[in-house]
Image (cartoon, grey):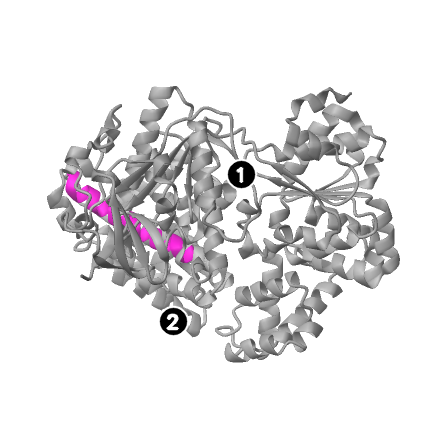
């Protein structure tokens, strides 16, 4: 029965065999924390602990299901009796049992986000509030945030800061919406997702007998990914474990990356303060990655100040160094990565599923999707739809389709009232009926709306005419303008971008990024067509190109595929080969998350997570210039590249300040097109990106004039004196004493220094 314990190393075994008292397992990436948690639960059961007395909380249903299956292999069917699942699923179960205590029935409904947003929207309408100020998605997002912070309407009224912030935002009636929303949910016998935590806290705090019941039931509590818990989750776990204090939390502070969802890293950092006589176990042996990857990740995360002490190590092979590649544009980055995957796959006999492309935001997937498709490499985008299947992208494409082909009825129906212009479904139905009777297209009916007697009011007729005018004006551009100019005009004149800009939610920001990325893709398409083919870069050609994307996606279901995902989604996964792309300042780290040390440290932890997904190879890339609204903007390498100890990386292309400020036209004049735009797949395509010998690398940013004693200026560290220069060629380092940053060692190929004297 106990043979399974032989699969554990010494540190894992100690953590598993400890039964009683509070304990924390600080587990580095790839150290087998899930195995410890699984075996610990199995061990408790083999020691006679009733599975009904064990509560195991995870963050995904998948994790809970896999752990249950592993436990069942050791202890049999008794594993079914465990209280195991996500926080929300377990607490929903408790709330159904105790529903009457808080005035609900056991069959209460759980509202999803769309249900909740629709309810908020109708309340705003009923209260006659200005929809431009009280945007329903923004209001719901605020309600959700307050609930997760356990701020009820009563608590809100006692918080002057919250009241004042709503006054400034001209939302003085927010509290009325909040109160009415709670009231309507209650009347409907419904809870939203946030209520599952809020009502559980309410239940345990208001009803001591209920708290005592579940304290006696859950004698042993285990929590996975403890670094991702929010304040509400912490309070529930603390309350339930207070009596017996048999609580085991497992996590890695270096992988705390969900603060935007309310996760509080202090929960794991301060665990020892929350409980008496805490047993601490450290899982530091990494079984996943090569020595080089582990050491590189350690050198990076060491730059964080707020962390728990641990030193991750591995007995795996040394492995290859991390490749860092500089490309010219984001389109070029997409083509390089696709070519690299193609070549690596051929050389090492890897499968497509052995590769993952990780990026900071979903919008970045476009360039890689396009390039993989053109090389016939199957892929799958995780965490949402493929780029061209996302709603905001399909909406804009529908405008373009209707402009090109007025007979496209599906496109017409999709956008006639989007953004909302007061043309309801009833009016659209009348247009459809009229088109069938007249045996013409819906668009023709709309275009000649005054000629038809479809019982449509003058007000609606005017709105339909305005929509037709928008389409017709853009149609005039077809003969003279390229695909980029037309797309840019559609985004502007349709009002789609403005709609999302005004919403001011996390979701709307993501949609805005996707729209911007679509523009980047169209610009890249126009430039590529102009330089490499005889075809005119028309909007018709672009739509045909995009149509191939969707067709290709549909035809590769079930096949072996390259994975594309954000780093947040990659947490907990592993791949032989990892590509981390878009490593530029203001993109990664994100410009929105570098306003404080806490934010910057979370961005660094996110990069740490990206590095530690890899088993064999890591490839980092960034670009000199990135399209923003169709214009090339200069970029600088992410500070995180410089924070990895140089002995663990290979720089595959020279970095020159002269190149970083080139316009796109200058780039075309300075480089052979063969190096810029890849042709059809060839096995040796990426040979343009071989490591350069020191003899042909010109890295000194100052034409060899930088000497000891120079006074220089750095964008982050301010003024400083050069104390020491060491290394040659591509590896020249300067030791500089800065006024702000103190003593720093900087690689000149990354450092953007200005000589003052």
Screen quadrant of the N terminus: top right
Residue 699 visible to the viewer: yes
Q: Earlier in the sequence, mark 2 or mark 1?
A: 1
Residue wearing tag 1? 311
The magenta stretch spans which residues? Answer: 511-533
Screen quadrant of the C terminus: bottom left
Pick the front one: 493 or 604: 604
User: Which residue, as the protein is rendered here, is positioned at the far left?
Assistant: 669
Tag 2 near tag 1, CB within 8 Å? no
Q: Say whether residue 382 is left or right of residue 251.
A: left
**Residue lying at 21% horizontally and 42% vertically, measured from the top left:** 528
* Position of residue 306 measured from the top left corner of the image (x, y, whole percent): 53, 53
Q: Secondary structure at mark 1?
A: loop
**Label 2 crowd (10 A; few <14 / some 14-19 / many >=20):** few
Q: Main secondary structure of the magenta part?
A: helix
Pick the front one: 585 or 706: 706
Q: 117 above or below 526?
A: below
**Label 1 crowd (10 A; few <14 / some 14-19 / many >=20):** some
Residue wearing tag 2? 462
Q: Secondary structure at mark 2?
A: helix
Residue 540 visible to the viewer: no
Q: 249 above or below 474?
A: above
* Position of residue 126 measured from the top left corner of the image (x, y, whole percent): 61, 74
* Label number found at residue 741: none
Residue 522 drawn in magenta: yes
Q: How many marks?
A: 2
Pick the front one: 47 or 97: 47
Residue 301 drawn in magenta: no
Whole-number angstrom distance, CA of label 2 to CA of label 1: 69 Å
**Residue lying at 63% horizontally and 55% vertically, measured from the top left:** 230
* Position of residue 571 measured from the top left corner of the image (x, y, whole percent): 53, 41
């Amino acid at each position: 029965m106990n043979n399974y314990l032989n699969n554990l190393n010494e540190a894992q075994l100690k953590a598993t065999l400890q039964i009683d008292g509070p304990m924390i397992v600080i587990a580095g990436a790839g150290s087998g924390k899930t195995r410890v948690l699984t075996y610990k639960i199995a061990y408790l059961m083999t020691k006679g602990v009733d599975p009904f007395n064990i509560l195991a909380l995870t963050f995904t249903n998948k994790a809970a299901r896999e752990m249950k299956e592993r436990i069942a292999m050791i202890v049999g069917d008794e594993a079914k009796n465990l209280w195991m699942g996500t926080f929300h699923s377990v607490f929903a179960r408790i709330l159904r049992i105790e529903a009457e205590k808080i005035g609900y029935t056991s069959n209460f409904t759980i509202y999803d986000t769309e249900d909740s947003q629709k309810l908020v929207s109708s309340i705003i309408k009923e209260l006659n509030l200005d929809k431009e100020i009280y945007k329903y998605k923004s209001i719901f997002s605020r309600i959700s945030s307050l609930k997760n912070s356990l701020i009820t309407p009563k608590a809100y009224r006692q918080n002057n800061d919250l009241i004042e912030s709503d006054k400034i935002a001209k939302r003085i009636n927010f509290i009325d919406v909040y109160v009415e929303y709670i009231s309507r949910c209650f009347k409907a016998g419904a809870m939203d997702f946030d209520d599952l935590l809020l009502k559980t806290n309410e239940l345990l705090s208001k009803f001591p007998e209920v708290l005592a019941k579940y304290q006696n039931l859950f004698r042993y509590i285990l929590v996975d990914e403890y670094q991702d818990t929010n304040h509400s989750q912490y309070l529930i776990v603390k309350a339930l474990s207070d009596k017996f204090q048999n609580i085991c939390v497992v996590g890695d502070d270096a992988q705390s990356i969900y603060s935007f969802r309310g996760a509080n890293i202090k929960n794991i950092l301060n665990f020892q303060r929350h409980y008496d006589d805490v047993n601490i176990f450290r899982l530091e042996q990494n079984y996943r990655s090569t020595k080089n990857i582990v050491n590189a990740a350690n050198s990076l995360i060491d730059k964080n100040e707020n962390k728990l002490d641990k030193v991750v190590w591995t007995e795996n092979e040394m492995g290859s160094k991390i490749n860092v590649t500089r490309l010219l544009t984001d389109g070029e980055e997409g083509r390089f990565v696709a070519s690299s995957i193609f070549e690596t796959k051929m050389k090492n006999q890897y499968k497509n599923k052995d590769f993952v492309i990780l990026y900071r935001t979903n919008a970045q997937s476009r360039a890689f999707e396009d390039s993989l498709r053109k090389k016939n490499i199957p892929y799958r985008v995780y965490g949402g739809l493929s780029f061209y299947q996302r709603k905001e992208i399909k909406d804009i494409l529908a405008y373009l389709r209707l402009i090109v082909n007025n007979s496209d009825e599906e496109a017409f129906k999709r956008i006639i009232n989007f953004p909302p212009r007061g043309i309801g479904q009833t009016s659209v139905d009348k247009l459809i009926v009229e088109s069938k009777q007249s045996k013409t297209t819906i668009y023709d009916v709309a275009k000649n709306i005054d000629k038809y007697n479809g019982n449509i009011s003058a007000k609606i007729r005017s709105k339909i005419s305005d929509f037709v005018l928008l389409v017709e004006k853009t149609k005039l551009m077809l003969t003279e303008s390229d695909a980029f100019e037309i797309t840019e005009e559609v985004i502007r004149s349709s009002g789609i971008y403005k709609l999302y800009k005004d919403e001011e939610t996390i979701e709307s920001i993501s949609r805005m990024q996707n729209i911007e990325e679509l523009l980047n893709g169209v610009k890249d398409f126009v430039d590529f067509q102009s330089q490499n083919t005889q075809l005119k870069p028309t909007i018709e050609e672009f739509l045909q190109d995009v149509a191939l994307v969707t067709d290709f996606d549909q035809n590769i279901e079930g096949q072996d595929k390259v994975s594309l995902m954000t780093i947040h989604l990659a947490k907990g996964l592993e791949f032989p080969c990892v590509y981390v792309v878009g490593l530029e300042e203001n993109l990664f780290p994100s410009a929105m998350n570098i306003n404080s040390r806490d934010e910057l440290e979370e961005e660094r932890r996110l990069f740490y997570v990206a590095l530690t997904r890899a088993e064999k190879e890591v490839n980092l890339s960034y670009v000199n210039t990135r399209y923003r609204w169709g214009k090339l903007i200069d970029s600088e390498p992410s500070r995180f590249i410089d924070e990895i100890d140089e002995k663990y990386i290979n720089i595959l292309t020279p970095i020159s300040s002269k190149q970083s400020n080139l316009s796109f036209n200058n780039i075309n004049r300075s480089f052979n097109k063969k190096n810029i735009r890849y042709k059809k797949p060839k096995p040796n395509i990426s040979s343009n990106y071989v490591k350069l010998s020191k003899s042909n690398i010109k890295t000194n940013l100052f034409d060899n004039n930088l000497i000891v004693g120079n006074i220089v200026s750095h964008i982050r560290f301010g003024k400083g004196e050069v104390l020491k220069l060491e290394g040659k060629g591509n590896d020249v380092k300067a030791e500089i004493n800065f006024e702000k940053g103190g003593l720093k060692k900087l690689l000149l190929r990354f450092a953007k220094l200005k000589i003052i004297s």
